[in-house]
């Protein structure tokens, strides 16, 4: 009885060992060890280094040196050099910057000659004047007066022209000859010797 039991246990043990060996050779269908290592390393290094260095150096040096040196000697004198009241052997003279008046006393009658000075030049020693309408000679015409000083400081005047058609024509007339005013040289005759009144 014990022998039979022992035989049975031996058989069972052997069968169990065979089963385990068969089990070791079989694949477990439920063991799905799918080791899929997908390493997707997308390294996009976009290094856009745009160095726009616009160095616009505009050096505009405009040196405009306009040196306009206009030396025009128009002789704009403040006062006419011979202004004042004068007398001569024939006339008395009242001279300003704008008028030249000559008075001839009687006999026979007092006569006045009036001139409106348009321009004068102290350096050129002349005056250009319009004859007023009441003048006995050349009313409305133009006159040129020249003056000169002699070596003794004596003033002499000359009515060089009294019937010019314009101021320009009167100014364009040649100046009277003042070389020897006491002896002559004035177109109309001798020069007039003027003495300042009060002397």
Image (cartoon, helix red, strand yellow):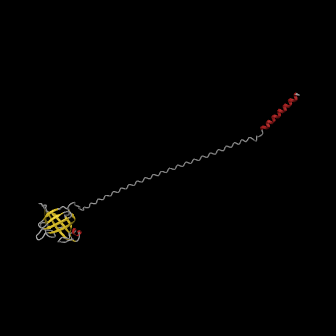
Looking at the picture, tell me which residue is in the foreground, 194 or 139: 139
The quadrant in which residue 134 appears is bottom left
- Classify residue 22 as left or right of residue 167: right
Question: Picture coordinates of residue 164 (x, y %)?
Answer: 21, 71
> Extreme right residue here?
1
> Extreme front residue here?
109
Question: Picture coordinates of residue 108 (x, y %)?
Answer: 11, 71
Looking at the picture, tell me which residue is in the foreground, 22 or 131: 131
| Point 79% across, 36% down: residue | 21
Residue 174 seen: no
Question: Picture coordinates of residue 184 (x, y %)?
Answer: 13, 68
- Classify residue 141 as left or right of residue 47: left
> Extreme top residue here?
2
Please tell me whether residue 63 is drawn above or below residue 138 in the rendered image.
Answer: above
| Point 78% across, 37% down: residue | 23
The quadrant in which residue 136 appears is bottom left
> How many numbered dots are placed on residues in this image?
0
- Classify residue 190 as left or right of residue 72: left
Please tell me whether residue 117 is drawn above or below residue 9 in the rendered image.
Answer: below
Looking at the picture, tell me which residue is in the foreground, 14 or 49: 49
Residue 12 seen: yes
Quarter of the picture containing the C terminus is bottom left
């Amino acid at each position: 009885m014990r022998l039979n039991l022992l035989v049975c246990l031996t058989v069972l043990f052997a069968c169990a060992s065979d089963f385990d060996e068969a089990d070791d050779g079989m694949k477990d269908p439920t063991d799905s060890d799918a080791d899929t290592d997908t390493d997707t390393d997308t390294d996009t290094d976009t290094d856009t280094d745009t160095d726009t260095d616009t160095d616009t150096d505009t050096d505009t040096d405009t040196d405009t040196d306009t040196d306009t040196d206009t030396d025009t000697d128009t002789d704009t004198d403040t006062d006419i050099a011979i202004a004042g009241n004068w007398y001569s052997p024939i006339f008395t003279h009242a001279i300003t910057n704008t008028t030249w008046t000559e008075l001839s006393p009687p006999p026979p009658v007092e006569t006045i000659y009036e001139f409106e000075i348009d321009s004068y030049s102290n350096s050129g020693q002349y005056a250009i004047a319009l004859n007023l309408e009441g003048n006995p000679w050349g009313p409305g015409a133009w006159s040129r007066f020249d003056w000169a000083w002699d070596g003794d400081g004596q003033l002499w005047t000359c009515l060089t022209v009294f019937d010019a058609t314009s101021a320009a024509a009167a100014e364009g007339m040649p100046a009277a000859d003042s070389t020897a005013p006491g002896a002559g040289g004035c177109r109309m005759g001798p020069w007039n010797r003027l003495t300042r009144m009060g002397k």
